[in-house]
Amino acid sequence: MVSQTTQTITVSHRRESVIVQFTNGFVLEGPVGTTIEAFLRADQEHHPERYESPIMGALLDMKLRELSYPVKHDAEIVPVLLSSSDGGRIYRRSLVMLLVTALGELWPGTTVSMRYAVPDGGYYCTLLNRASLTADELEQLEAHMREIVAADEPLTKKMMPLEEALALFKSRGEDAKIRLMEQRKRQELAMYTLRGRADYYYGYKLPSTGYLQYFRLIELNGGFILQYPRKENPTLLRDIEPSNQLTKVFNQADDWLDRMKVEDIGRLNRIVRENRVGELILVAEALHELQIARMASDIYERHHSQGTRLVLIAGPSSSGKTTFAKRLAIQLLAHGLRPFTLELDNYFVDRDLTPKDENGLFDFEALQAIHLPLFNNHLLELMGGKLVRMPRFDFVLGKSVEGRLAQLTENQIIIIEGIHGLNPALVPDIPPESIYRVYVSALTQLNIDSHNRVPTTDVRLLRRLVRDATHRGYNAGATIDRWPSVRRGEKLNIFPYQENADAMFNSALVYELAALRPVAEPLLQQVEPGTLAHIEANRLLSFIRWVVPFTAEQEAKIPDTSLLREFIGGSILTDYHPTDLSIGDEGIVGAE
């Protein structure tokens, strides 16, 4: 029984109770071995205002723990709710286990794959060994899942000998898990069981199915979406808006993986161990170049047919936008079009006119931080062949000063990279036919196996912390601390406009986790213990260690034009600047 206490207990021989303290100073006492769930339920009774969304887990002495974790010593405790990133991950993993269990009970032997995440919250799923479910069957499946939720069935965890786990996976024909276990060093594996079905799931789970109140199944494109709530509205399910462009990208990625015979991380590991990475790298890079060449050809055709002169590039952090823009510029040159890159930062309003955020700090990511009338006027004049005095923003003075002169020729294309590139409000004065918009992001990623996804957000974070350490002097802890703020900016300024893109560039590379691990792992190991960043670092380490790292010889096979070189270093494109066509300090850009 959990009780409220404010007394100090002196330890004599054997403790019979433990004390937990919450961040608001509230203290609870219970028998040794009382679960985190029991302590949080007791706190919720006293402080319901602290629980604006369902409980998913807790930080116990700054370590992420499951609700079923028994507390054996005095500790500080912080609730982890569904409205948090860690809480959302715990919920989604448990929901996948519910789906897999219910599917297996209705149609024994049926296997399902979590293919990719959809923007409005959900996994697109397909069946691997039978025809897709009919509308009636999908309704039956959802009803059975809800029956299991209503029964509040326990999800239990135990350590299973690896040999026993492998035998289980073999009996069910789960080749992806068998391949994955080739990387397992320990001779036991944490397995979760629901209604007699044991399985491996990377990461923590909920203690029972009663927590899984928010989900639905939606038929889509021969498969279905397992929808879950987003942390912004953790008890609501959004309306799903199908994206034809994203669907095309995902189908293309599946086709590429099939060509390369790489279905999951276990298959990648075998290729790395057998030192067959050369061909894999070449094919992956060729597929990137094929995408870029097609976009350049499209821009060329539009330039001549409808007068397209402006290419706007946007995408979330660490998508590889800089390298993409340079490689696109090279492809445009090959088509006879001369690229001119314009830096949006030079159009910042003076510092005293910069909008501020809710904390009173300058918000340089706000659209209003840009001098939009001047920016649009200059674009129109440049596209009209006029001579323009470009601004240059002096970040020391915090104000705009005069820059160089520019005058473009008829065969020049303006390229602008920035977070607002897909937002129509950036260029309200520019004729739509003059604009070509590109959305760049790592849109797909190899999964650990059919039931365990690797979020593309995690891969972008790994890219960023490697780049920050290599080129910007930031340690991994600082990068992780800034990541939530970066993500908020993406959700506000980029993701709502991605459907405005004329083309989407999937910057993911099938081999990149193997190339990132040797650089990222030591950086993550240096994050200071006892911090929130350390919790995130441990989570990233736990999944990246499933990947066999490249050797130095294998890393050397990555081309010096690869998008990945933007992060790990060694890019030949670092010093390539398409705007470097001026004559002297006051020369005319584009002059022949």
Image (cartoon, rainbow, N blue to C red):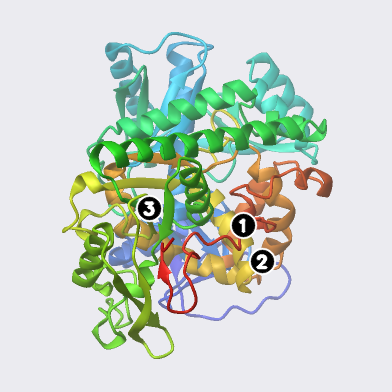
Q: Label 2: few (<14), some or many (≥20) within 10 Å? A: some
Relative height, residue 157 to residue 528 (above, below): above
Relative height, residue 89 to residue 257 (above, below): below
Residue bearing the label numbered 3: 412
Q: In screen coordinates, is 555 left or right of 116? A: right
Residue bearing the label numbered 1: 567
Whether tag 3 and tag 2 are in contact, CB under 8 A, the answer is: no
Relative height, residue 335 to residue 418 (above, below): above
Query: Which of the two discs, 3 and 2, labels the residue nearer the N terminus?
Result: 3
Looking at this view, name the residue that lies furthest to the front.
592
Relative height, residue 436 to residue 98 (above, below): below
Query: Which of the two discs, 1 and 2, labels the residue nearer the N terminus?
Result: 2
Q: Amino acid at mark 2?
A: Thr
The residue lying at 23 percent from left, 58 percent from top is 384
Q: Position of residue 282 (x, y in %)?
A: 68, 34
Whether tag 1 and tag 2 are in contact, CB under 8 A, the answer is: yes
**Residue 54 appears anywhere in the view:** no
The residue lying at 69 percent from left, 45 percent from top is 559
Q: CA distance from mark 1 to mark 2?
A: 8 Å
Residue bearing the label numbered 2: 470
Callout 1: SS: helix
Of tags 3 and 2, which is closer to the observer? 3
Query: Which of the two discs, 1 and 3, labels the residue nearer the N terminus?
Result: 3
The residue lying at 49 percent from left, 51 percent from top is 319
Q: Amino acid at mark 3?
A: Gln
Q: Amino acid at mark 1?
A: Phe
Callout 2: SS: helix
Work out whether residue 459 or residue 418 is closer to the camera in this orientation and state it. 418
Q: CA distance from mark 3 to mark 2?
A: 34 Å
The residue lying at 40 percent from left, 70 percent from top is 588
